Image (tube, helix red, strand yellow):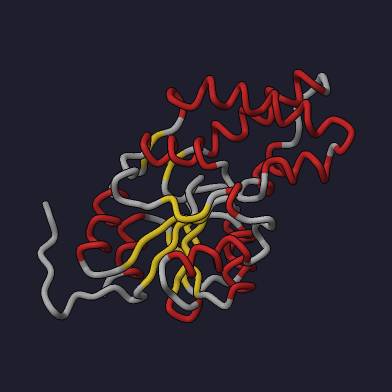
Amino acid sequence: MTRQYTDTVTPRWPVVIFDIDGTLVNSVDLIVDSYQHTFRTILGHEWDVTEIKTWIGKSLRGVFEEKFPDQADAMFDEYSRWNDTHTAESITGYDGMPQLVADLVASGARVGAATSKRREPARWALELGGLEALVPLTIAHEDVDAHKPDPAPLLAAAIKLGATPDHVVYVGDAVVDIQAAHNAGMDSVGVTWGAGTLPAMIAAQPNALVDTVAELRAVLLR
């Protein structure tokens, strides 16, 4: 049912910027599987899943360059090939997310996405999640030189949306999302259905931490 708005229903923040992977779309398993395929192919063995999940939200190339500098190019290429091949069958949306975003826009909020994902895979993920027409891909990997937890992508997104940091909330599922929001001088909302563990997300100290899309709605709209 489409929500009917009155003058008393407003967005808590005038600008809402979302992370994509693990926040707007269910892609964490695909990312983990893509890393594991890459490690099996290049290294001959898999990697610790818990550590892999801490990389989600960071620049993919940056992770490979930091952790495996001698094999970063080969790993990036192998990951990208496998990920592209399996994206359509693996990424799904979260129930209620398209309606929440639509209701945010109807309430007068400006909405965007800032991600460490490359632009074309990010656009594809939004499409598979039923969000391409609702969430502008404001900042992707190619648009900035530094990536989360650096504030650069969030600040660039705020500028594109015509906002100052004190009017923005960033919604994300990973510790680096919350850290980037803190570093940008923005409020943050953490979601627990993505990559971050609950203790780590609590320790990152978002302004709010939610377990469901319904709880996210209650935080973003009043």
Q: Nearer the viewer, residue 198 or 185?
A: 185
Q: Quadrant of the C terminus?
A: bottom left
Q: Is residue 61 left or right of residue 84?
A: right
Q: Is residue 54 above or below residue 199?
A: above
Residue 95 picture quarter: top left
Hey, which residue is sitting farthest right in the picture? Answer: 70
Q: Is residue 33 above or below residue 204?
A: above
Which residue is drawn at the image coordinates 68% and 49% (left, top)?
54
Q: Position of residue 151 (x, y in %)?
A: 63, 67
Q: Is residue 149 left or right of residue 210?
A: right
Q: Does residue 189 appear anywhere in the picture?
A: no
Q: Is residue 188 above or below residue 52?
A: below
Q: Is residue 22 left or right of residue 127?
A: right
Residue 17 picture quarter: bottom left
Label tally: 0
Q: Does residue 24 appear anywhere in the picture?
A: yes
Q: Is residue 211 above or below residue 125?
A: below
Which residue is drawn at the image coordinates 13% and 60% (left, top)?
3
Residue 133 picture quarter: top left
Q: Position of residue 42 (x, y in %)?
A: 80, 21
Q: Position of residue 186 (x, y in %)?
A: 52, 75
Q: Nearer the viewer, residue 138 or 1?
A: 138
Which residue is drawn at the image coordinates 76% and 18% (left, top)?
41
Which residue is drawn at the image coordinates 35% and 70% (left, top)?
219
